[in-house]
Amino acid sequence: MATLLKKPVTREVRNWCRKGLFGLGGSGGRALIVSLEPGPVISFREKGCKKRYDIDIERVFNLAVRQDMLKRDAEKKKRKKARK
Protein backbone atom coordinates (compact mmCIF):
# COMPACT_ATOMS: atom_id res chain seq x y z
CA MET A 1 0.00 0.00 0.00
CA ALA A 2 1.32 3.43 -0.91
CA THR A 3 2.08 6.14 1.64
CA LEU A 4 0.01 9.33 1.59
CA LEU A 5 2.11 12.36 0.60
CA LYS A 6 1.92 14.79 3.54
CA LYS A 7 5.16 16.76 3.08
CA PRO A 8 7.32 17.55 0.03
CA VAL A 9 9.74 14.93 -1.28
CA THR A 10 12.70 16.46 -3.11
CA ARG A 11 15.34 14.68 -5.20
CA GLU A 12 18.26 15.75 -7.39
CA VAL A 13 18.52 14.39 -10.93
CA ARG A 14 21.79 14.59 -12.88
CA ASN A 15 22.30 14.16 -16.63
CA TRP A 16 18.62 14.86 -17.23
CA CYS A 17 18.84 17.03 -20.34
CA ARG A 18 19.03 15.57 -23.82
CA LYS A 19 20.83 18.19 -25.89
CA GLY A 20 18.55 19.93 -28.33
CA LEU A 21 15.32 18.71 -26.73
CA PHE A 22 12.57 21.02 -28.04
CA GLY A 23 15.31 23.27 -29.39
CA LEU A 24 16.23 24.46 -25.89
CA GLY A 25 19.76 23.09 -25.85
CA GLY A 26 21.62 22.06 -22.74
CA SER A 27 21.28 23.19 -19.17
CA GLY A 28 24.92 24.12 -18.66
CA GLY A 29 25.49 20.91 -16.73
CA ARG A 30 23.20 21.86 -13.84
CA ALA A 31 21.33 19.18 -11.95
CA LEU A 32 17.55 19.27 -11.85
CA ILE A 33 15.74 19.44 -8.52
CA VAL A 34 12.36 17.68 -8.63
CA SER A 35 9.82 17.96 -5.79
CA LEU A 36 6.55 16.11 -5.28
CA GLU A 37 4.39 18.52 -3.30
CA PRO A 38 1.37 17.63 -1.18
CA GLY A 39 -1.57 18.39 -3.38
CA PRO A 40 -1.37 17.57 -7.06
CA VAL A 41 1.84 19.47 -7.94
CA ILE A 42 5.30 18.54 -9.24
CA SER A 43 7.94 21.30 -9.05
CA PHE A 44 11.12 21.58 -11.12
CA ARG A 45 14.10 23.91 -10.79
CA GLU A 46 17.72 23.90 -11.85
CA LYS A 47 20.18 23.51 -8.99
CA GLY A 48 21.47 26.91 -7.93
CA CYS A 49 18.47 28.79 -9.35
CA LYS A 50 15.44 30.08 -7.49
CA LYS A 51 12.96 30.01 -10.40
CA ARG A 52 10.54 27.10 -9.96
CA TYR A 53 8.32 25.56 -12.59
CA ASP A 54 5.18 23.87 -11.28
CA ILE A 55 2.81 21.53 -13.08
CA ASP A 56 -0.18 19.63 -11.79
CA ILE A 57 0.02 15.86 -11.68
CA GLU A 58 -3.10 15.43 -13.84
CA ARG A 59 -1.38 17.15 -16.79
CA VAL A 60 1.74 15.02 -16.38
CA PHE A 61 -0.36 11.85 -16.25
CA ASN A 62 -2.35 12.85 -19.35
CA LEU A 63 0.89 13.64 -21.20
CA ALA A 64 2.33 10.23 -20.28
CA VAL A 65 -0.84 8.47 -21.47
CA ARG A 66 -0.82 10.44 -24.74
CA GLN A 67 2.86 9.65 -25.36
CA ASP A 68 2.21 5.96 -24.74
CA MET A 69 -0.71 5.98 -27.18
CA LEU A 70 1.40 7.69 -29.85
CA LYS A 71 4.19 5.15 -29.33
CA ARG A 72 1.75 2.22 -29.63
CA ASP A 73 0.16 3.71 -32.77
CA ALA A 74 3.59 4.21 -34.37
CA GLU A 75 4.60 0.60 -33.59
CA LYS A 76 1.28 -0.68 -34.93
CA LYS A 77 1.73 1.35 -38.12
CA LYS A 78 5.30 0.05 -38.50
CA ARG A 79 4.17 -3.60 -38.12
CA LYS A 80 1.34 -3.04 -40.62
CA LYS A 81 3.76 -1.53 -43.13
CA ALA A 82 6.19 -4.43 -42.65
CA ARG A 83 3.43 -6.96 -43.46
CA LYS A 84 2.74 -5.34 -46.83
Image (spheres, rainbow, N blue to C red):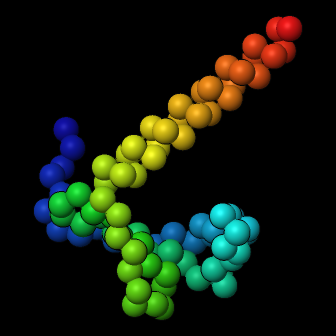
Name the spot of residue 42 as percent of width and height, x first.
Answer: 33, 64
Numbered-mark total: 0
Left or right: 30 in relation to 77: left
Taking the image as drawn, is residue 54 in sight?
yes
Q: Which is more toward the observer, 26 or 13?
A: 26
The residue sitting at 59% across, 34% down in the picture is 70
Which residue is drawn at the image coordinates 53% and 35% (left, top)?
Answer: 68
Q: Quadrant of the C terminus?
A: top right
Across and down, in percent, residue 75 comes to 69, 25
Judge whether residue 11 can be spotted in this image: no
The x, y position of residue 9, in whole percent, is: 28, 67
Q: Name the side, left or right, on which 38 lies relative to 10.
A: left
Horizontal side, residue 73 vs residue 57: left or right: right
Instruction: Pick the quarter of the image with the N terminus.
Output: top left
- Dividing the picture into quarters, in which one does residue 36 lie? bottom left
Q: Residue at x 46, y 44 (%)?
A: 64
Residue 18 falls in which quadrant of the image? bottom right
Give 22 or 46, whichever is nearer the viewer: 22
Against 73, residue 51 (above or below) is: below
Splitting the image into 4 quarters, where does residue 78 fall? top right
Q: Position of residue 82 (x, y in %)?
A: 84, 15
* Residue occupying image coordinates x 62% and y 26%: 73
Q: Is residue 30 above or below residue 3?
A: below
Vertical order, 63 against 36 (above or below)? above
